[in-house]
Image: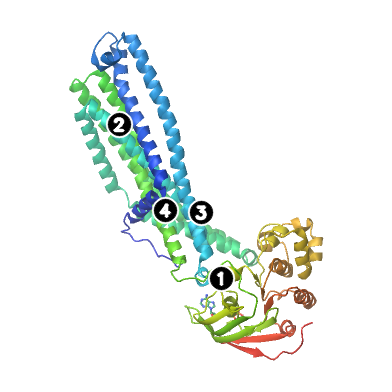
Amino acid sequence: MTDPGPPARGASHADARAFILAFAAHAGRGGVGAVALVAAGALLEGVGLALLVPIIGLILAPDETGGWVAGLIGGDATGRLTLLLVGFLGVMILRALVLRWRDLALFELQNRFTLRLRSNLVGALAEAPWERLARVEHARVTSLLMADIGRIGSAAHFLVQSAVSVAMLAIQLLVALALAPLFALFALGGLAAATILVRRASPNSAVLGRRIVEANRGLMGSASGFLGGLKASAAQGASARFADEFDAAQRGAAAEQRRFMRSQTNSRTLLSIATALAAAGVVAGGVLAGVSAPVLIALIVIFARMAPLAIQLQQGAQQLIYNGASYAAVCAAEAELRTDAPVAETAEPPPPGAILLERVTYRHGVGGGGVSGVTLRIEPGEIIGVAGPSGGGKTTLIDLISGLLAPQSGTITVGGVPLARSGWGATVGYVPQDGFLFHDSVRRNLSWGDPGCDDAAIHRALDVADATALVARMPRGLDTIVGERGALLSGGERQRLSIARAVLGERRLLILDEATAALDPASEATILAGLTALTPRPVILIVAHRAETLARCPRVIRVESGVVREEPVAAPVR
Ligand SMILES: Nc1ncnc2c1ncn2[C@@H]1O[C@H](COP(=O)(O)OP(=O)(O)OP(=O)(O)O)[C@@H](O)[C@H]1O
């Protein structure tokens, strides 16, 4: 996921169009039901408005007979008025119920749309090949998942509200046309002219929308950069600089939002004035043309209802275009993560047997580092030290063996079967140098590696990792919270808990990537002895720079300049 670059000044409404099409496709049959409810709500609104004319007529002139009401209902004026009011009430109650169902149905559509977008993006992250995942900017993902999908939710809300407004406006216009066609057309023309004027006067909402996507990302980047290096920032007195940077990013984002808000409020003010003028024109014209009082009052009621709807429609369209930029950003990120290359996936772990690399080459796209022509056979249960200078290719080799990277040429098989990521991945335990603990209890941190495990299994794993005494000393034992990234523990303690987590579950490959570097030699020896005693014992790959760590391995390979060779072993494992 690389930077899409600054927004173009001439950004069109393509983002919003793509969003509307996607939303319509997503809505499917549920959308048809919602549209039917929108139409029914609008129809009932129209019936209610149409009933106003005879009701007002009967109130103003109860003695006048005639009209379709008398023909249809008959009886005296009071009886007719009572019946009309009951009918009006019935229509309004039904309308209220239909609007309730409509709003629930529309909410469901909106909600499912954003849920699906979020799941798709997370799914793309989960399925992305490691080489793409390694390039992902965390702040961008956080910003997409939170800020942008939130904005897409708003866009979906404005889209459905706009659909409702269009339906309501259409029916009100029909009623107005039936009552006084000339005045209705006049009011419509006035509104259309005002809308065009407003559009011309507003800045490009699509451009503003793209800018706010960037601004939010900057904000998230600033926060995650600081939180990622919390200790270094505090120790080096950089916290104040972070606060300044964050403030600047925040002010940038607020300025973009303010620009959009100004444009929204300006257009709302213009439209409010235009609709007031149109209403005044209708009343003045109606009086001059001698339109009857009931019709005039009904027209005023209708226009009073149309004006806010027209404003809502215009504002909704602006919001839609503004927030459509977030939809484009989420789609772009998902497309970058997904690959067309077929990935060898199977839920089945490979059969027992040796791990075999034959003439395996992998070169990273940028810089060309990696490994070349590696041929290596690893028997089940072997313990192998992986040595070599920094940048020599150790991690690349480990990532190939764990299935994170697929060879660009050559083959990797396990038990004679080509490596497939998911089935093999579930049997791999990986411990990085800095451990990896999240802000939760020891128990939850450990069982993350094997969700179904019980406390007895956790205690066995703690034994292997020489961490039983450590957890016993903790104030709440397995329920003790370890802090964000294990900040409440020492480096060595973090490593021990990470090792305990990695050995939980049935592992066939255990990778310790500088995972004992923060431990004293005695603890390291205890842990390696515990790992050696595991039954069945997984293949254990120990990436290390320390000679004494490598000296504990019965076999050592050296990875240098991307080439792998066997290293003479100095001492047997103890
Ligand atoms: N994702 C990547 N994109 C581009 N180049 C990479 C990537 N990962 C590693 N490299 C390059 O590949 C080469 C081998 O890196 P690798 O991480 O495998 O070395 P290493 O032996 O594990 O180093 P260290 O001991 O410092 O961790 C290096 O030149 C490195 O810069």
Name the amino acid, label 4: Glu
Mark nearer the viewer, 1 or 3: 1
Type of colouring? rainbow
Chain-order first, disc 1 or disc 2: 2
Residue flagged by tag 2: what amino acid is it? Gln
Q: Which residue is mark 1?
A: 421
Pair 1/4: label in front: 1
Residue tagged 4: 256
Say which of marks 3 and 4 sits in front: 3
| 3 versus 569 height, above or below | above
- Mark 2 neighbour class, 10 Å CA radius: few under 14, some 14 to 19, many 20 or more: many
Label 1 vs 3, first from the N-terminus:
3
Numbered circle sitting on residue 146: 3
Question: Tag 4: Cα neighbours inside 10 Å, few (<14), some, or many (≥20)?
Answer: many
Q: Earlier in the sequence, mark 2 or mark 3?
A: 3
Q: Nearer the viewer, mark 2 or mark 4?
A: 2
Is 60 on the left or on the right of 104, as rendered?
Answer: left
Tell me the kind of residue under disc 1. Answer: Arg
Q: Secondary structure at mark 2?
A: helix
Cα–Cα gap, marks 1 and 4: 44 Å
Residue 150: x, y in percent? Answer: 48, 50
Q: Nearer the viewer, residue 146 or 63?
A: 63
In space, the residues marked 2 and 4 are separated at their CA atoms by 37 Å
Residue of label 2: 172
